Image (tube, rainbow, N blue to C red):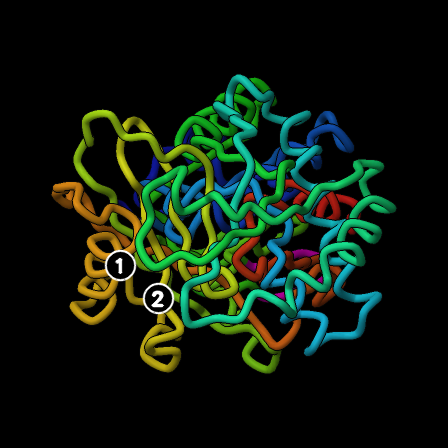
Amino acid sequence: MLKLNALSYWERNSYFEGLDFVIVGAGIVGCSTAIHLRKKYPDAKILILERGYLPMGASTKNAGFACFGSVTELCDDLKKMPEPEVWLTVQKRYEGLIYLQELIGRENLDFQQNGSWDLIDGKTDPAPYRGQLDYLNEQIGELTGEMNVYSEDLGVQQRFGFGDVKTGFYNRLEAQIDTGKMMLRFAALLSEHKILHLSGIEVIDLVQQNGSVQVQTSVGEFKASNACICVNGFAKRFLPNDDIQPARAQVLITKPIENLHIKGTFHYQMGYYYFRNIHNRILFGGARNLAFEAETTETLENTELITNELKSKLKTMILPGTPFEVDYTWAGIMGVGQTKKPIIRKISDNIAIGVRMGGMGVAIGSMVGKENAELF
């Protein structure tokens, strides 16, 4: 790839000179940040840089869950986190999903509100979760204005033909989206808003310097008035002392299955396993809890341990008695920490950061981008 000093006057002048904002990362957060900066500064020159030819992290690699909180996850969070923080997190997710629909449009998301089920297997006692349903419904009702969001579905195993499922807790408001279509719409919005976007350029460092930012990249250096880092799970290099770690999520998808009757999104073991229907296929991901240390990585590859576990669960739990073949496997990188609150702040006078989506980038990413833009 040509270095910047080998580019023509036209190329340098059009793309790399007179920049008001440089956005690092072209996923949900980066695109949303750029769009909101344009709304705030109509005449600004804005450039998004992405090191891959597609977003590298999770924006086009996730499972496409429009979710804000399952029963088992919330019960677990309430044991580990202060109660107000739990519900503030849920509120941010719920409002973020509404905002994403407003920004992108339901039709561009292929938004399908089929609900979600939190599955309980035969080895788990559902009684503690059952006892929390009234409380969870009261709290979520106050946040959303929707009553009886959560309910127990004792017939979930029979309805979908699952194996080793005792019961399930239903969330009628959760949905599923097509994240590929979402990112195509984001790309169209960048074009409509005259935002520059270049792929294949890695940002190595950003240096605050005399009221501007020196942008050090794989193709050379240039200057911008301001910069915003939106690389989520890859942010440790920019925030070495902050509580943020990469978390790999491995996913597989089957070939089309004739007469597939599974419809909706499903969580298992507090969300460490998750699956859904898509185009007569089953998309299934998770099992990071089998190897937390090994999955704390930026390496985008699948492992035999996780892939075999997902195949086993497909055979015994999700599709017992139904022949299937795995068509694709892939991995994405999330950004996580001890808290589920994202990091949104200025790290110098002219550099901001919006990262650590906690596995909820679909729900909160567009709102984090809006909050990033408001920092400038």
Residue at image position (49%, 21%) is: 188
* Amino acid type of the residue that numbered disc 1 sits on in the rendered structure: Lys
Residue 99 as seen in the image, left or right of residue 295: right
* Amino acid type of the residue that numbered disc 2 sits on in the rendered structure: Ala
| Magenta span contains residue 212 | yes
Residue under label 2:
287
**Which range of residues does the magenta coloring cover?**
207-214
- Find the distance from the CA under tag 1 to the CA under tag 2: 10 Å
The crowd level at tag 2 (other Cα within 10 Å; few <14, some 14-19, many 20+) is many
The percent position of residue 113, horizontal first and vertical second, equals 56, 29
Residue 40 as seen in the image, left or right of residue 193: right
Residue under label 1:
313
Residue 143's disc is none
The percent position of residue 203, horizontal first and vertical second, equals 44, 57
Q: Are marks 1 and 2 in contact (CB under 8 Å)?
A: yes
Residue 198 or residue 88, whichever sits in front = 88
The percent position of residue 34, horizontal first and vertical second, equals 62, 37
Disc 1, SS? helix
Q: Is residue 191 visible?
A: yes
Disc 2, SS? loop
Residue 206 or residue 209, whichever sits in front = 206
